[in-house]
Image (cartoon, coloured by chain):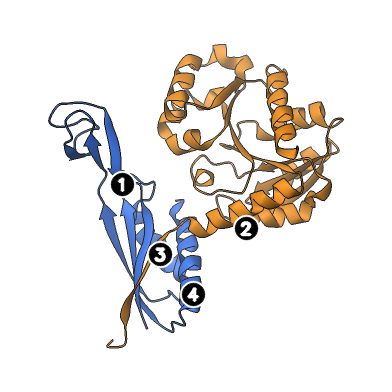
Chain colours: A orange, B blue
Amino acid sequence: MSNFKVLEIKQNVFENNNRLADSLRKDLKKDKTFLLNLMSSPGSGKTTTLTKTINSLKDEMNIGVIEADIDSSVDANTIFQTGAKVIQLHTGGMCHLDAGMTKQGLIGLGTKEIDFAILENVGNLVCPAEFDTGASKNAMILSVPEGDDKPLKYPLMFSIVDVLLINKIDVIEHFDFDLEAVKERAMKLNPNIKIIPISARTGEGIDEWVDWIRTEVKKWNS
Amino acid sequence: MHELGVVIEVVKTVEKFAAANHLVKIDTLVLQIGELSSMIPRYIKECYPAAVDGTILQDTELKIEIIPGNAICKDCNKVFNIIKNNGKCPCCKSKNWDLLSGKEFFIKEIVAC
């Protein structure tokens, strides 16, 4: 034991990941690829929203999708039908993606010819919020059936995203979902958050969402 | 249980540090966790043996120091613990305060040779 000594590390646990994420963002900027990290609970309608989004934008830009799941390729097959380039990542039980895994996905996708890349993160409102993936912007989907209390339960997620999509707005009358309360709770955590109510099924609100993407892609790739 | 992924991140950082400093054996790892961070010390301890299995941290002792969630009142300058006082200054009952500490999640130090 006499040879043992105390060595100070004093390092933020997320520092390595943050550094890798920053360097990934720089590469994406250079390659003119806008990367959107899309997060949500399982079953909130991420894949349906993506399908609608891709169909609205595919004539204007080259789109690539990285699907991250613990297992299966169900989502990748659905996205493949839209004609977008898609790659499936298996996290092998891990509940989130970090910058290293995102980098692998981007290499698989090949960013040179992609203008707009979407990372469909693992369905989870906790862990993905902790890890910077290197994305240009972060968005999340909250669906009406999940309830209006989610900003109170998962504050970190709501405080780190640039956009909050409130999906399944077409069925709001069947649920005790207070849209104004959600907006207020989310704005309290994150005053700059952009909130767009949508229905991936009926197409309501998709135009506004797609407009936001258009503007951001242009800004990033200019 | 999102602690496991995070502890694996800790292992990666320590492995790098150990390689850079030519360490051969680690005895103890000390983490600092803020009361207001999203990490639960009990879960960190529970998943630690699994996360470090087969790494340089295998068979090491894990110590966790808790950093209090403290704030300073902007109205009367009192320093107080946010959790114990339900987010209100115990002196003037103000909710107008600045956070001083409690969101940290640091690898503080290791005992090694």
- Reading the chain from its start, which is encountered first: label 1 or label 4? 4
Q: Which residue is mark 2?
A: A100
Q: Residue B69 placed where, x, y %?
A: 27, 44
Per the image, label 1 sits on a secondary structure element best described as loop
The residues bearing labels 1 and 3 have C-alpha atoms spaced at a distance of 22 Å
User: Looking at the image, which is closer to me, B113 or A94?
Assistant: B113
Q: Residues within 10 Å of mark 2 (few under 14, many from 20)?
A: some
Q: Amino acid at mark 3?
A: Tyr
Q: Are marks 2 and 4 on the same chain?
A: no
Whether residue A195 sits left or right of residue A27 in the image: it is left
Q: Give the left or right position of residue A160, taking residue B80 as reference.
A: right
Residue placed most toward the observer, B38 or A202 = B38
* Quarter where residue A107 is shown: bottom right
Q: Which residue is mark 3?
A: B48
Q: Are marks 1 and 4 in contact (CB under 8 Å)?
A: no
Q: Give the farthest residue toward the bottom.
A: A2
- Residue B75 percent coordinates (x, y): 20, 28
Q: Residues within 10 Å of mark 4 (few under 14, many from 20)?
A: few
Q: Nearer the viewer, mark 2 or mark 3?
A: 2
Q: Decide: few, some or many residues near mark 3? Use Cα within 10 Å; few <14, some 14-19, many ≥20.
A: many
Q: Which mark is residue B102?
A: 1
Q: Nearer the viewer, mark 1 or mark 4?
A: 1
Which residue does the numbered mark 4 point to in the structure image?
B55
Estimate the spatial distance between the alpha carbons at disc 2 and disc 3, rounded to whole Å: 22 Å
Residue A154 appears in the picture as rendered: no
